Image (cartoon, coloured by chain):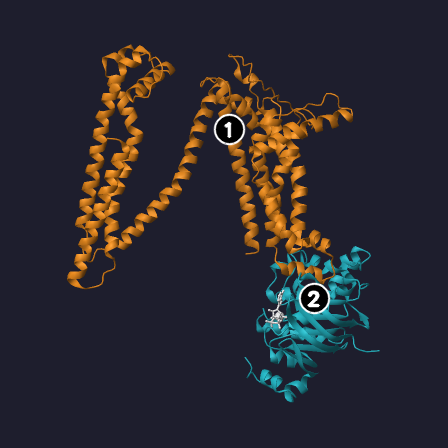
Amino acid sequence: MSILVLSFLVVGLGLIAWLTARMRAAGFRRATGARFSSLPSHHGAFVALWTVLPAALFLAVWATASPALVTDRVLTDPAAAQLPPPGFERAALLSEAREIAAGKSFGEPTPLAAKLAPAYADAQSHYDWIGSGVALLLAFACGAWAFTRVRPDFRARSKIERVIMALLLAASLIAILTTLGIVVSLLFESIRFFQMVPIGQFLFGTHWSPQVIDARDPGASLGALPLFWGTFFIGAVIAMIVAIPFGLMSAIYLTQYAHPRARAWMKPIIEVLAGVPTVVYGYFAALTVAPLVRDFAVSIGVSWASSESALAAGLVMGIMIIPFVSSMADDSIAAVPTAMRDGSLAMGATQSETIRRVLLPAALPGVVGGVLLAVSRAIGETMIVVMAASGVATLTLNPFASATTVTKQIVDLLTGEAEFDSPKTLAAFALGLTLFVVTLLLNIVALTVVKRYREAYE
Amino acid sequence: MNASKISARNVNVFYGQKQAISDVSLDFDSDVVTALIGPSGCGKSTFLRTLNRMNDTIANARVEGRIALDGEDIYAAEMDVVQLRARVGMVFQKPNPFPKSIFENVAYGPRIHGLASGSAQLADIVERSLKRAGLWDEVKDRLSDSGTALSGGQQQRLCIARAIAVDPEVILMDEPCSALDPIATARIEELIHELKGRYAIVIVTHNMQQAARVSQRTAFFHLGSLVEYGTTSDIFTNPRQERTKDYITGRYG
Ligand SMILES: Nc1ncnc2c1ncn2[C@@H]1O[C@H](COP(=O)(O)OP(=O)(O)OP(=O)(O)O)[C@@H](O)[C@H]1O
Ligand SMILES: [Mg+2]
């Protein structure tokens, strides 16, 4: 039975449950004439939920577990004895057999896969029947049990409230659990990597050339320090040199000087900038800014300037971050009580003196928190550096030299043919983990700072 | 030539289309405390803020009429607002010390206006202002603590110290005690008495007893107009207008 038909059946059962429970409850109500805490529709919903939810839950679990069961059963088939040992080839054959069994194969099938296909179809339908049977039984049994609980004094209303709360909780847990899953898998792959390459060598090694890895000493060419430096240099230094002054000044203008009418159209425009896809900034960086930067460098005598310079990527990244810094700073400045500003103006301070001596110091923690968030965003930014930064890792202080970042290297490591056990591929996970940890810490610090600041002015 | 410290003639104030003050003429003398009273929303704060041009900070506010400080029109184009506000200080309803140290709060004005030629002189000004505001004994050992860490009443006296540190000629106070308890209020009133001889003081208050206690002149506002202006004892014992009488006897809302 297909999952669609099954779902219809379960929902249908739920509907029937709803109607009958409602009628039963309404009957009680008429018979006694009293008022109860729950309306008939609450009883209906209660029984319907009991009918549908357990079955749905089972189906969800079953959908993830049954493929493995099916494969296990196929492997008991005599033809399966000819399968190659576990590995990529075996998995490919099995998946081809599955496709044939589902009637979805194209082209000439592999003989072995074709031989396994009937076994697959057989196993599939076997477990399908089991799954459908259990689901329907579950729906029926739970529904019936709930139905027996419909009594005049039964508080279906509060039970439903609890179910709804549980549903909402589950929805919010899904995002958290998914993230947790990703982190755990990142952690596992990284541990595998660190079994091949010592962690110290990875973090502090200065030589990065994953294209040529000596199998006997993979760590020698997987020293990620130049990447960390490049990331920091582009995202936290060059980009911030652009983003902080411009973001801050635009926030000051918008909160303190702009006429309400000017603010009404300028602020949305700046916010829209934050929504420009980063790939567009990437274009801009690679095709417009990078050549300009190189030409400029050459004109001031830096003849060896790279056309994939740290400066080009950092500048554009800074521009990308401006709206972010601006809106964080805007919020922080706006949170400083007007009374503070009036107090300063009433002392005879000019507007810029008031900003410099009272508003900015008062808003500083909020601004710092915002800048930290911006840094964490910049170092995680990928598209601009993929398009505009160089692939060559250099430890340099020269903004015209080429520099690369962690995100760019992760992309490079994982694109192209990838063997899943090589130090080269696993290095991507280790890089990802490092980036994750750093941005996580930055975010925690930033959010704490911002929160403290908010509390200071209630 | 008018001898009054501040003289306001035919003042109108608008917020956008809405008129908040209509045709008010009032004189304030030196050495005198003048109280502005009237029901909520009648425009006391608005009028007070015209006297040091704090209405400039409100985008849609517009002031008409003539207000002169020592005979000089403060709304004239050549008037320097920075100078004006140094001469006409202001204390707000809610204490609003800057998030700086106590010392820096008081030193703020003198620094801006370049009143001290060295750190010793600055310290001198700060000490004198805090003494005059009656706060010195309470804070002299912790001048580097944050001004926001003081109690509400202390904060308000700090704000008064801050205002008198630039040696103003007029001090405007907008309900300076409304956020304070009776003891702190009594201290501020005492302080106003002590400051009286030195500055022209204009105080907005909702508290009739307070107006009677601290002021020598009282102006009663209603719906944006000046209803009655006279010596405090006349206003309170012998009001000429029915509306004034209703208000001070509490028969008005
Ligand atoms: N910034 C503003 N924009 C528009 N209207 C304002 C503004 N400030 C005050 N008003 C209006 O002007 C009128 C006078 O207000 P004002 O604050 O001067 O009254 P008040 O006498 O000080 O009242 P209270 O005793 O409650 O402080 C009120 O009707 C008020 O709504
Ligand atoms: Mg007021």
Q: Which residue is mark 2?
A: B62
Q: Residue furthest right?
A: B1
- Quadrant position of residue A133: top left
In the rendered structure, which amino acid carries the disc numbered 1? Answer: Gly
Q: Residue furthest front?
A: A107
Label 1 resides on the chain identified as A
Q: Which residue is mark 1?
A: A432
Chain A visual colour: orange
Q: Is residue B141 visible?
A: no
Question: Quick check: A142 left or right of B240?
Answer: left
Question: Quadrant of the image for the N terminus of chain B?
Answer: bottom right
Q: Residue at x 28, y 34 (%)?
A: A4
Label 2 resides on the chain identified as B
Q: Report helix, strand or loop for mark 2.
A: strand
Q: Report helix, strand or loop for mark 1.
A: helix
The vertical placement of A324 against A356, above or below, is: above
How far separated are the C-alphas under marks 2 and 1? 59 Å
Numbered circle sitting on residue A308: none
